[in-house]
Each structure stands twice: as C-alpha cells, then as structure tokens.
Amino acid sequence: MNIALAIAIVTVAGLLGSVILVLAAKFMAVEEDPRIGEVTSCLPGANCGACGYAGCADYAKAIVEGGAPVNKCVPGGAKAAADVAAVMGVEAGATAAVRATVRCQGKPGVCTQIFDYHGVSSCAAATALYGGPKACAYGCLGLGDCVKACKFDAIHVVDGIAHVDPEKCTGCGACAAACPKSVIEMASDMEEKPLVLCHNTEKGPVVMKECQTGCIGCMKCQKTCPSEAIKVTNFLASIDYSKCTGCGQCVEVCPKQVIVRA
C-alpha cells in the first residue's frame, strides 16, 4: 500500500511539473520576428562565416534585429542581397564579387622537393613536419586541405597545385582559412586583370634555387606599370586593383612568368 501511494504521489508530482513547464514555456516565450526566417531563406545556407557572423541564421538575426548591412553575403552575391533587401524594404547597395586565387605555380618539377612525404594527406600535417617537403616554404603543398574545406566544389588539386574554378567560386574564403601556407588570397575587382602567382618573400637568388616560377623581386613590373598599380615589397610583387587598368604590361616584362592574366 505504501509503495502504491509513493508511486501515485510521484506520478501526480510529475504531471504537475509538466503542466507548470508547459505553461511557463507558453507565457514566457519570446516571439521571433518572422522576417528572420524569411531573410534566412534568402541566404545560400553555406554557413561559411564570410559575412562576419557565425552562420546564415546568425547573420539573418543581425540584419533584422541589429540593422546589419544586407549585402555582406559573399556566396549569395547580388541576388541574395536583392532578395534580403526586398524583405527588409531597403536598398541592397553594391556587392563586390570576391574570388579566391592560389598564388603559386610551384608544381613538382618546377619547385624543388627536399624530401619525400608519405604522411597524412593534409597540408597542415605536412607543414608541421619541417615546414613541408618543398624547398619553398611559401608554396602550395597540394594535399587538399582547401579542397576539403570548399562547400562549392570550386577548388581542386591539379599537378600538385590547387586550382580555383572561377565559375564555381563564391568567394566564401573557406579555402583561404584552411591553407596553412596562406597561399590562397581573396580579392575583388580582379576581372581581366593580372595576377601575381607567387607568395615567396625571400631574396631573388634564394627563390631561383627553390622554384623556377618564383618572384625574384627584379622590379621590372613596378618600373613598367603606367598606373603605379604594382609594387615590389619584401622582394615580392603585389597589385593594387583599385589602380590597375588591366593593360598587361607587367605580364609581358616578367622574366619568371610569375604575373599572368586572370
């Protein structure tokens, strides 16, 4: 009899607790602005973080509740910005197209190998072992960390070097974040403009021993550029795309064929 009474008391207490929790959830619930769901549905769902927020849902909440700009979704581009702007009743504003570039051409046979690597197929793991098997400490290792990070199938390893498919690249930056050598660069306004496919900041004589297609800091490109858009700093050429007109003179004078057309 005592056992039955105890069971009854526990059962009643459990039911009362459940009722209290249900009522509390109902009366204490905070209603979410329905526009958050609408904005989230306008975004590509990549959750890449390129917008500066933890994911698409977090960005949508920041737009609706915090007034964040509607055009910060890089993978979604202009379409996502326009769709979100329509939900929010604001202007979308300009959206700059961003894409990834692998700043290296040092495939096997072009870049000197200092040892054979037979470890885990990971650039990060190889880098931890004496900086990797390449003589150039700045070059692409081609073991595919960037490929695994890309959610859009926009980057693949070909002949030992990562290559970006510009038609698929959304500019999310996941590949750049995954590269332990920082070889992948994100940039906008690069359409039909030259690219510097080297990341090595060592002096010319050292680079020439390490790689056949490395920048040697000769400054021919800088001296030739009519718009002063290319500078050599720390023995490495870099392009200011806000000044570059795409004339291609730097491409023509580069003795190592480091500068190429996009």
Image (cartoon, rainbow, N blue to C red):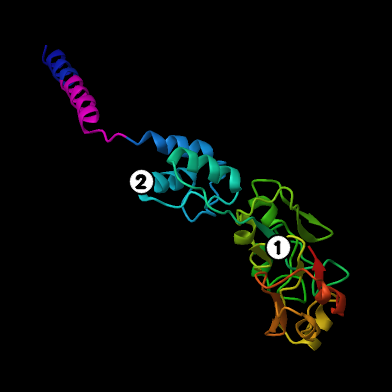
Cα separation, mark 2 vs mark 1, equals: 34 Å
Query: How would you rate the neighbour count of disc 2 (Cα within 10 Å): few for under 14, some for 14-19, many for 20 or more?
Result: few
Q: Is residue 92 above or below residue 4?
A: below
Q: Is residue 106 visible?
A: no
The residue tagged with tag 2: helix, strand or loop?
A: helix
The residue tagged with tag 1: helix, strand or loop?
A: loop
Most foreground residue, 5 or 72: 72
Judge from the rendering whether residue 202 lies leftward or rightward of residue 40; answer left or right: right
Amino acid tagged 1: Met
Which quarter shows the N terminus?
top left
- Tell me residue 124's x, y (percent): 64, 63
Q: Is residue 119 magenta?
A: no
Q: Which mark is residue 190?
A: 1
Magenta segment boundaries in residue numbering: 13-31
- Mark 2 or 1, nearer chain start: 2
Query: How would you rate the neighbour count of disc 1 (Cα within 10 Å): few for under 14, some for 14-19, many for 20 or more?
Result: some
Q: Which mark is residue 65?
A: 2
